Image (cartoon, rainbow, N blue to C red):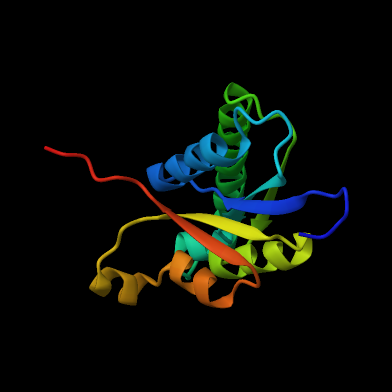
Amino acid sequence: MAATSEKQVMVVAIDESEHSDYALKWTLDHFFTPIPNPLFKLVLVHAKPYATSALGIAGPGFAEVLPIIDADLKKRAAKLVDKAKEVCQKKSVSDVEVEVIEGDPRNVLCEAVDKHQASILVVGSHGYGALKRAVLGSVSDYCAHHAHCTVMIVKKPKTKH
Protein backbone atom coordinates (compact mmCIF):
# COMPACT_ATOMS: atom_id res chain seq x y z
CA MET A 1 0.00 0.00 0.00
CA ALA A 2 1.28 3.45 -0.89
CA ALA A 3 2.45 5.77 1.85
CA THR A 4 -0.30 8.27 1.13
CA SER A 5 -3.15 9.38 3.36
CA GLU A 6 -5.64 8.90 0.53
CA LYS A 7 -7.84 5.85 0.93
CA GLN A 8 -8.03 3.08 -1.60
CA VAL A 9 -11.32 2.87 -3.47
CA MET A 10 -13.75 -0.05 -3.36
CA VAL A 11 -16.41 -0.07 -6.05
CA VAL A 12 -19.53 -2.11 -5.28
CA ALA A 13 -21.97 -2.94 -8.08
CA ILE A 14 -25.62 -2.47 -7.16
CA ASP A 15 -28.75 -3.54 -8.98
CA GLU A 16 -32.27 -4.59 -8.02
CA SER A 17 -31.39 -8.23 -7.31
CA GLU A 18 -31.26 -9.88 -3.91
CA HIS A 19 -27.74 -11.03 -4.82
CA SER A 20 -26.59 -7.44 -5.15
CA ASP A 21 -28.32 -6.50 -1.90
CA TYR A 22 -26.57 -9.37 -0.12
CA ALA A 23 -23.17 -8.42 -1.62
CA LEU A 24 -23.53 -4.81 -0.42
CA LYS A 25 -24.50 -5.85 3.11
CA TRP A 26 -21.71 -8.45 3.22
CA THR A 27 -19.17 -5.86 2.09
CA LEU A 28 -20.32 -3.31 4.67
CA ASP A 29 -20.16 -5.93 7.44
CA HIS A 30 -16.70 -7.17 6.51
CA PHE A 31 -14.91 -4.01 5.38
CA PHE A 32 -16.68 -0.98 6.87
CA THR A 33 -18.33 -1.78 10.21
CA PRO A 34 -17.60 -1.58 13.08
CA ILE A 35 -14.28 -0.10 11.90
CA PRO A 36 -14.23 3.61 12.85
CA ASN A 37 -11.89 4.58 9.99
CA PRO A 38 -12.23 2.07 7.14
CA LEU A 39 -9.35 1.46 4.74
CA PHE A 40 -11.51 2.09 1.69
CA LYS A 41 -13.54 4.86 0.16
CA LEU A 42 -16.86 3.32 -0.90
CA VAL A 43 -18.31 3.95 -4.36
CA LEU A 44 -21.59 2.28 -5.31
CA VAL A 45 -22.22 1.97 -9.05
CA HIS A 46 -25.50 1.12 -10.78
CA ALA A 47 -25.62 0.46 -14.52
CA LYS A 48 -28.96 1.81 -15.74
CA PRO A 49 -30.09 0.10 -18.95
CA TYR A 50 -30.73 2.15 -22.06
CA ALA A 51 -34.44 2.61 -22.70
CA THR A 52 -34.02 0.94 -26.09
CA SER A 53 -32.51 -2.18 -24.55
CA ALA A 54 -35.19 -2.33 -21.86
CA LEU A 55 -37.90 -2.20 -24.51
CA GLY A 56 -36.23 -4.76 -26.75
CA ILE A 57 -38.36 -4.08 -29.82
CA ALA A 58 -38.69 -1.49 -32.54
CA GLY A 59 -41.56 -0.45 -34.75
CA PRO A 60 -44.33 2.11 -35.16
CA GLY A 61 -44.82 4.20 -32.04
CA PHE A 62 -41.36 3.26 -30.75
CA ALA A 63 -40.19 6.88 -30.41
CA GLU A 64 -43.23 7.86 -28.37
CA VAL A 65 -42.70 5.05 -25.86
CA LEU A 66 -38.97 5.64 -25.25
CA PRO A 67 -39.36 8.71 -22.97
CA ILE A 68 -41.86 6.81 -20.81
CA ILE A 69 -39.52 3.82 -20.50
CA ASP A 70 -36.56 6.10 -19.75
CA ALA A 71 -38.50 7.95 -17.04
CA ASP A 72 -39.43 4.62 -15.44
CA LEU A 73 -35.80 3.44 -15.53
CA LYS A 74 -34.69 6.70 -13.89
CA LYS A 75 -37.33 6.29 -11.13
CA ARG A 76 -36.23 2.72 -10.51
CA ALA A 77 -32.57 3.79 -10.37
CA ALA A 78 -33.38 6.58 -7.90
CA LYS A 79 -35.31 4.13 -5.70
CA LEU A 80 -32.37 1.69 -5.82
CA VAL A 81 -29.91 4.44 -4.87
CA ASP A 82 -32.10 5.52 -1.94
CA LYS A 83 -32.33 1.91 -0.74
CA ALA A 84 -28.53 1.42 -1.01
CA LYS A 85 -27.86 4.66 0.89
CA GLU A 86 -30.32 3.55 3.57
CA VAL A 87 -28.51 0.20 3.93
CA CYS A 88 -25.21 2.08 4.31
CA GLN A 89 -26.67 4.46 6.92
CA LYS A 90 -28.12 1.55 8.91
CA LYS A 91 -24.58 0.12 9.03
CA SER A 92 -23.24 3.56 10.09
CA VAL A 93 -21.41 4.11 6.80
CA SER A 94 -22.06 7.68 5.73
CA ASP A 95 -19.06 8.41 3.50
CA VAL A 96 -20.38 6.80 0.33
CA GLU A 97 -20.47 7.99 -3.25
CA VAL A 98 -23.17 6.67 -5.58
CA GLU A 99 -23.14 6.76 -9.38
CA VAL A 100 -25.83 5.79 -11.85
CA ILE A 101 -24.34 5.31 -15.29
CA GLU A 102 -26.29 4.35 -18.38
CA GLY A 103 -24.94 1.34 -20.24
CA ASP A 104 -24.08 -2.34 -20.16
CA PRO A 105 -23.11 -3.36 -16.60
CA ARG A 106 -19.91 -5.08 -17.78
CA ASN A 107 -18.59 -1.92 -19.41
CA VAL A 108 -19.98 0.47 -16.79
CA LEU A 109 -18.27 -1.39 -13.93
CA CYS A 110 -14.91 -1.77 -15.65
CA GLU A 111 -14.97 1.92 -16.61
CA ALA A 112 -15.88 2.90 -13.02
CA VAL A 113 -12.90 0.89 -11.76
CA ASP A 114 -10.62 2.81 -14.12
CA LYS A 115 -12.22 6.20 -13.37
CA HIS A 116 -11.84 5.79 -9.60
CA GLN A 117 -8.58 3.82 -9.77
CA ALA A 118 -10.29 1.25 -7.58
CA SER A 119 -8.35 -1.43 -5.74
CA ILE A 120 -11.33 -3.77 -5.44
CA LEU A 121 -14.56 -4.30 -7.36
CA VAL A 122 -17.32 -6.18 -5.52
CA VAL A 123 -20.09 -7.86 -7.50
CA GLY A 124 -22.83 -10.22 -6.43
CA SER A 125 -23.16 -13.61 -8.05
CA HIS A 126 -26.52 -14.64 -9.47
CA GLY A 127 -25.46 -18.27 -9.32
CA TYR A 128 -26.32 -19.05 -12.93
CA GLY A 129 -25.48 -22.48 -14.28
CA ALA A 130 -23.15 -22.91 -17.24
CA LEU A 131 -25.92 -22.78 -19.87
CA LYS A 132 -27.65 -19.68 -18.51
CA ARG A 133 -24.27 -17.97 -18.03
CA ALA A 134 -23.32 -18.77 -21.65
CA VAL A 135 -26.60 -17.40 -22.99
CA LEU A 136 -27.03 -14.36 -20.76
CA GLY A 137 -23.38 -13.64 -20.11
CA SER A 138 -22.04 -13.19 -16.63
CA VAL A 139 -21.22 -9.70 -15.43
CA SER A 140 -19.05 -11.08 -12.64
CA ASP A 141 -17.17 -13.36 -15.05
CA TYR A 142 -16.58 -10.52 -17.49
CA CYS A 143 -15.36 -8.19 -14.73
CA ALA A 144 -13.08 -10.87 -13.29
CA HIS A 145 -11.34 -11.06 -16.66
CA HIS A 146 -11.41 -7.39 -17.71
CA ALA A 147 -11.40 -5.11 -14.65
CA HIS A 148 -8.00 -3.62 -13.79
CA CYS A 149 -8.24 -4.48 -10.11
CA THR A 150 -9.04 -7.30 -7.74
CA VAL A 151 -12.59 -8.56 -8.26
CA MET A 152 -14.47 -10.07 -5.35
CA ILE A 153 -17.56 -12.09 -6.27
CA VAL A 154 -19.89 -12.41 -3.28
CA LYS A 155 -22.18 -15.42 -3.41
CA LYS A 156 -25.36 -15.49 -1.37
CA PRO A 157 -25.49 -18.75 0.61
CA LYS A 158 -28.13 -21.18 -0.58
CA THR A 159 -31.05 -21.56 1.77
CA LYS A 160 -31.68 -25.02 3.14
CA HIS A 161 -35.15 -26.45 2.64
> Residue 74, percent across and down?
62, 45
Q: Does residue 86 lie above or below 43 as drawn?
A: above
The spot of residue 84 in percent (x, y) is 58, 35
**In this view, 36 is above or below 140:** above
Question: Farthest residue in the right direction?
Answer: 4
Which image quarter holds the C terminus?
top left
- At 66% from the left edge and 30% from the top edge, which residue is drawn? 93
The picture quadrant where one finds residue 132 is bottom left
- Residue 3 shown left or right of residue 110 in the figure: right
Q: Is residue 48 visible?
A: no
Q: Position of residue 123 (x, y in %)?
A: 50, 55
- Name which residue lies at 32% across and 71% down: 133
Left or right placement of residue 3 versus residue 108 in this view: right
Q: In the picture, residue 75 is in which quadrant?
A: top right
Q: Could you say which is closer to the camera, residue 65 or residue 49?
A: 49
Count of numbered marks? 0
Which residue is rendered at x = 32% and y = 75% of the image? 135
Q: Which residue corresponds to the image point at 24% horizontal and 45% vertical from the top-left?
A: 158
Indicate whether 14 appears above or below 59.
above
Q: Is residue 61 above or below residue 35?
A: below
Q: Position of residue 122 (x, y in %)?
A: 54, 54
Task: Judge left or right: residue 140 versus residue 83.
Answer: left
> Is residue 11 visible in the rendered structure shown here?
yes
In the foreground, 67 or 95: 95
Location of residue 112 (image quadrant): bottom right
Quadrant of the snapshot with the N terminus: bottom right
